Amino acid sequence: MARRPGGGSYVTAFISKHALRSATLTLAMLAAGATAASAADKISIMVGGYEKQIYLPAKLAEALGYFKDEGLDVELLNEPAGVDAENEMLAGAVQGVVGFYDHCIDLQAKGKFVESVVQFSQAPGEVELVSSKHPEIKSPADFKGMSLGVTGLGSSTNFLTEYLAVKNGLKLGEFTSVPVGAGNTFIAAMQQDKIQAGMTTEPTITRLLKTGEAKVLIDMRTIEGTKAALGGTYPAASLYMQTEWVEAHKDTAQKLANAFVKTLQFINTHSGAEIAEKMPKDYYVGDKEGYVKALDAGKAMFTADGVMPQGGPETVLTVLSAFKKELQGKQIDLSKTYTTEFVKNAK
């Protein structure tokens, strides 16, 4: 047998070299497998502006440790406009969206099946504010020729704005929807008269009312106000996911439902001040008292159990059908736009 200089055979060296390479490859594969398993356990959820009080359950569940209690590694990503969050989910970049339920109906009309897995609220928590510079706007009938602020084009605030205008006799095209987000960007747009009215949520509402720069035109922060404006209970904030993904990951969907139902129960049994203490301090935008007051006034919008309110989907379909051509004359199976399976099985 040929010998290597310095001792040992070439065959032995060859075997040793390849054994080492094989062992290295095996370790690399095991490491990759561990990484893949870790990645499989991680859930990414896009929130349509997690500093908004309407989407409070997302950040609160994280703060209370309820995701970790369920063995979940949940990454919350912020996206100010719900329509952009929806697109991220459809592209597979995230597994779920905390946004308005109405997208589930809108998407079915486009051939995409998405469902609300946990229904957070039964009222939009939105207010149509009018700039104090425009006292001539006394109802949505006065929107003609106006620029109206919405979070994004195709967003739920856009849907509601168009419905209110059409309901009050206007036609699409007689007013302009301007995407201005929420918070500072919404406020700046109103201050600069880029919008004369707009739809937004807390804490933006309180900030503008406190300075006197805006007045409430239509208030949908309560169930009563919502019924008056939209004709019924209006399920809004939710965790929605692609139906195909939910069916393939029922165990994970159940864990998410467990965490969020516990969060909704926490909201239902604690004061605004107690809830606010769990939230990041910058969410107060320098006015903790106003934040707590708005939370106390509006937290009744949240469901106590995550269950879709009876009759709610029908109201949403009626609202959307009033102005969306894609829905007019189309058969929508509302039973496929939400599920109560997981919230009813929640711990």
Image (spheres, helix red, strand yellow):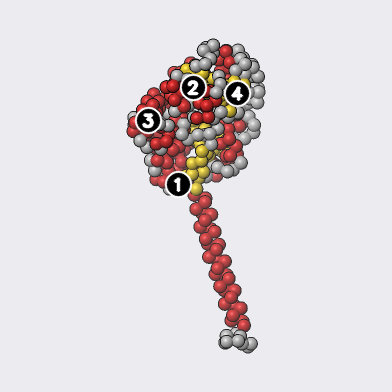
Q: Quadrant of residue 316?
A: top right
Q: Please report whichever mark, 3 or 1, sits nearer to the chain's N-terminal start.
A: 1
Q: Which mark is residue 127?
A: 2
Across and down, in percent, residue 263 comes to 40, 36
In the rendered image, which residue does mark 4 sit on? 177
Image quadrant where one finds the N terminus: bottom right
Across and down, in percent, residue 273 comes to 34, 31
In the rendered image, which residue does mark 3 sit on? 288
Q: Please report whichever mark, 4 or 3, sits nearer to the chain's N-terminal start.
A: 4
Q: Residues under labels 4 and 3: Cα distance? A: 31 Å
Q: Is residue 324 left or right of residue 339?
A: right
In the rendered image, which residue does mark 1 sit on? 72
Marks 2/1 in contact by CB < 8 Å: the verdict is no
Q: Which amino acid type corresponds to the residue marked 2 in the rendered image? A: Val
Q: Residues under labels 3 and 1: Cα distance? A: 31 Å
Q: Which mark is residue 282?
A: none
User: Is residue 316 something that shows in the picture?
Assistant: no
Marks 4/1 in contact by CB < 8 Å: the verdict is no
User: Is residue 4 something that shows in the picture?
Assistant: yes
Across and down, in percent, residue 270 comes to 34, 31
Select label 4 or label 1 by which is in front. 4
Q: For the residue carrying disc 1, how many other residues have a C-alpha within 10 Å: few (<14), some (14-19), or many (20+)?
A: some
Query: For numbered disc 4, what is the local secondary structure?
Result: strand
Q: For the residue carrying disc 3, how many other residues have a C-alpha within 10 Å: few (<14), some (14-19), or many (20+)?
A: some
Q: Nearer the viewer, residue 219 or 34?
A: 219
Q: Residues under labels 2 and 4: Cα distance? A: 15 Å
Q: Is residue 125 above or below residue 91?
A: above
Q: Which amino acid type corresponds to the residue marked 1 in the rendered image? A: Leu
Q: Please report whichever mark, 2 or 3, sits nearer to the chain's N-terminal start.
A: 2
Query: For numbered disc 1, what is the local secondary structure?
Result: loop
